[in-house]
Every structure is written in structure tokens, then in C-alpha cells.
Amino acid sequence: MQALKGIMWLMLLQLAGEALAHVLQLPFPGPVVGMLLLVFALYFQRIREPVKVAASFLLSHLSLLFVPVGVGVITHLGLIRDHGIKLGVVILVSTWAGMIVTVLLVRGLIKNQYEPTTEEMNRDA
């Protein structure tokens, strides 16, 4: 039952994101808005627990979710043949950019987490 509630929350937040992006004519897609709504919604215990159960279920069956994508890629082999190099460059650059941003973010978070404040340094002296 918890997994069903979690999937319901995920779908509702996705729908809300799509609706907000459409109504407000935002320059980014609805799924991005839905993910932002999900981040804020996870502060509430009532939403967090069911979503955690649903996410665990979905992650355990993640390989099944790639089957439609694989079929879709095969149906567009002509496009891949025509634009394969461009697609490869975009995938490589975006992957590296994502990894660099992640490293910088984690470094900043770790630095802020373990850096003693002036008050702590004076107290220990």
C-alpha cells in the first residue's frame, strides 16, 4: 500500500509540474518543475516514507524501464546514423559537465560541513 501511495505522489507531482510549466509558460520542461516540487515535498514525513518505498521498488525494477527506450532507439537508427557524431559529442560533454558540477558541489558541501567556525576555534583554544 505504501508503494502505491508513493507512486501516486510521484505521479501527482509530475502532473503538477507539467501543469505549472504549461500555465506559466516556463522556459524549462514540466518534469524539471515536478522534480523541484518533489524535493520540497520530501520535507514532509507523510510524503517521504511512501515515496521512499516506491523509489526502492522502481529502482529494483529499473532495467525493465529501459526496454521501451531501447526499442525507440532502434526505430530511429536513420537519425542516429545521420547525427551520431553530434549526439556522441553532446552525451560526452553533458556527462563530463554533470560530473564536474557534482564534484564541485560535493567539495563545497564537505568543506562547509567540516570547517570549524571562529566561535568553535576560540572555544577550543
Image (tube, rainbow, N blue to C red):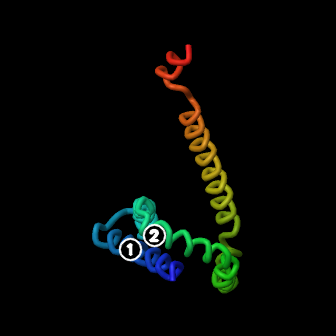
Residue type of the residue flagged with mark 2? Pro
Residue 112 position within the rendered picture, expressed as x and y whole percent measured from the top left: 54, 34
Quadrant of the rendered structure where residue 108 is?
Answer: top right
Query: In this figure, which residue is indicated by the disc labeled 2?
Result: 31
At 51% from the left and 83% from the top, the residue drawn is 1
Answer left or right for 82 relative to 54: right
Residue 62 higher or lower than 114, as above or below: below
Residue 46 position within the rendered picture, expressed as x and y whole percent measured from the top left: 42, 68
Q: Residues within 10 Å of mark 2 (few under 14, many from 20)?
A: some
Quadrant of the rendered structure where residue 87 is?
Answer: bottom right
Pick the quarter of the image with the C terminus.
top right
Q: Would you say residue 29 is visible in this rendering?
A: no
Query: In this figure, which residue is indicated by the disc labeled 1?
Result: 18
Marker disc for residue 76 = none
At 49% from the left and 76% from the top, the residue drawn is 6
Residue 23 position within the rendered picture, expressed as x and y whole percent measured from the top left: 28, 72
Disc 1 vs disc 2: Cβ atoms closer than 8 Å?
Answer: yes
